[in-house]
Image (tube, grey):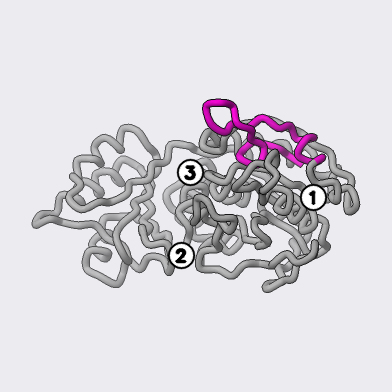
């Protein structure tokens, strides 16, 4: 078990909840785990997941890589706020894993009497020891969600995570997974990656935003994710300012991905004129049905691995764990 902090490990500090419980204290909260496996623990950091970013993803992946041959599976306890980002990042950093890598957390601290923490942690281990488990998943509120399809959609309720545009993999009942989808277990060794390019920015379009924002972004990021309206596209506001600025941005060797602010059903840039004009600006990649979390993590991975514009396009459109279709 790799403990990283989050609500599941929090106590009231007097200034609000803050991670305080150790990994061993968390395990002690759920004695039934000892009935299904022998669990070792490590705690590389103990932080609120709001503070988790790419360096933490790389550290978790490094720990799993260095211990991969020693264990049958890995459980990562994590705060809920950025758990979907971490699950997506691990899906790209550790590909084709025959062994399960399971993330979980809670909406209330394991320290409290009335909490979802104990059930979630138990379910994570019960899924992890199942023969059908492999790859990166989130186990939360009895649901098993693919790491590339998860999104936090509620801030208080126990059913905090949803699988976006893809079915849940399984549901946990009495300590056993009942599968909706039987995934083929990868054959052979997993493929590990150890580098990401964090210079990615997400630009959320709002009505009336100025195209001059591209001048600033061109000096500060290597990859840009445009969260556009509806099916996708850029406004022109009676001129072509956005399209001209975007062409200049791309000409500087930047990688652009267009996605949508709409949570479900994805983008379709070829549907409307505003989307087709965006495609005409140059090598604009389209996220289609990917979650924003997966787009951000994949773009960081692609920018670190690609050796050319064509290579970046190939990597981005190559499906990883059902992230794009």
Secondary structure at numbered mark 3: helix
* Of labels 3 and 2, the one closer to you: 2
Comes first in the chain, label 1 or label 3: 1
Residue 19 within the magenta-colored segment of the rendering: yes
Residue 119 within the magenta-colored segment of the rendering: no
Secondary structure at numbered mark 1: loop
Residue topped by disc 1: 73
State the mark number for residue 303.
Answer: 3
Rounded to the nearest angstrom, the CA distance separating label 3 from label 2 is: 20 Å
Instruction: Name the residue located 59 percent from the left edge and 70 percent from the top edge.
Output: 167
From the image, which quarter does the N terminus lie in? top right
Comes first in the chain, label 2 or label 1: 1
Instruction: Name the residue located 90 percent from the left edge and 52 percent from the top edge.
Output: 35
In the image, is residue 233 above or below residue 71?
below
Residue 189 visible in this rendered orientation of the protein: no
Residue 31 visible in this rendered orientation of the protein: yes
State the mark number for residue 289.
Answer: 2
Instruction: Name the residue located 31 percent from the left edge and 40 percent from the top edge.
Output: 252
Using residue 296 as the reference point, say whether residue 2 is left or right of it.
right
Residue 54 position in % (x across, y down): 54, 37
Secondary structure at numbered mark 2: loop
* Of labels 1 and 3, the one closer to you: 1
Residue 297 position in % (x across, y down): 51, 47
Q: Residues within 10 Å of mark 2 (few under 14, many from 20)?
A: many
* Cβ atoms at labels 2 and 1 below 8 Å apart: no
Using residue 221 as the reference point, say whether residue 297 is left or right of it.
right
Magenta residues, start to end: 1-28
Using residue 81 as the reference point, say whether residue 125 is left or right of it.
right
């Amino acid at each position: 078990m790799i403990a990283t902090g989050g609500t599941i490990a929090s106590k009231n500090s007097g200034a609000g909840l803050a991670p305080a419980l150790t990994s061993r204290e968390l395990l002690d909260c759920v004695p039934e785990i000892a009935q299904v496996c022998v669990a070792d623990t490590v705690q590389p950091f103990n932080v609120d997941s709001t503070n988790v970013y790419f360096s933490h993803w790389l550290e978790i992946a490094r720990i799993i890589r260095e211990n991969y041959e020693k264990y049958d599976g890995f459980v990562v306890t994590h705060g809920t706020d950025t758990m979907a980002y971490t699950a997506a990042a691990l899906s790209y950093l550790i590909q084709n894993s025959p062994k399960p890598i399971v993330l979980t957390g809670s909406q209330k601290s394991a320290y409290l009497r009335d909490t979802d923490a104990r059930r979630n942690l138990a379910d994570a281990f019960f899924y992890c020891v199942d023969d059908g488990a492999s790859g990166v998943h989130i186990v939360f509120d009895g649901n098993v969600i693919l790491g590339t399809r998860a999104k936090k959609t509620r801030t208080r309720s126990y059913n905090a995570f949803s699988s976006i545009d893809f079915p849940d993999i399984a549901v946990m009942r009495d300590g056993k997974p009942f599968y909706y989808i039987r995934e083929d277990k990868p054959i052979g060794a997993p493929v590990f990656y150890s580098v990401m390019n964090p210079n990615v920015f997400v630009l959320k379009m709002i009505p009336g935003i100025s195209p001059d924002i591209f001048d600033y972004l061109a000096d500060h990021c290597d990859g840009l994710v445009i969260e556009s309206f509806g099916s996708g596209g850029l406004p022109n506001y009676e001129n072509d300012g956005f399209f001209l600025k975007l062409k200049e941005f791309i000409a500087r060797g930047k990688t652009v991905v267009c996605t949508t602010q709409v949570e479900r059903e994805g983008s379709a840039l070829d549907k409307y004129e505003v989307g087709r004009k965006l495609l005409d600006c140059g090598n604009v990649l389209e996220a289609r049905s990917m979650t924003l979390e997966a787009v951000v993590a994949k773009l960081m991975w692609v920018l670190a691995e690609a050796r050319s514009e064509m290579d970046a396009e190939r990597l981005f459109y190559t499906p990883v764990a059902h992230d794009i279709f």
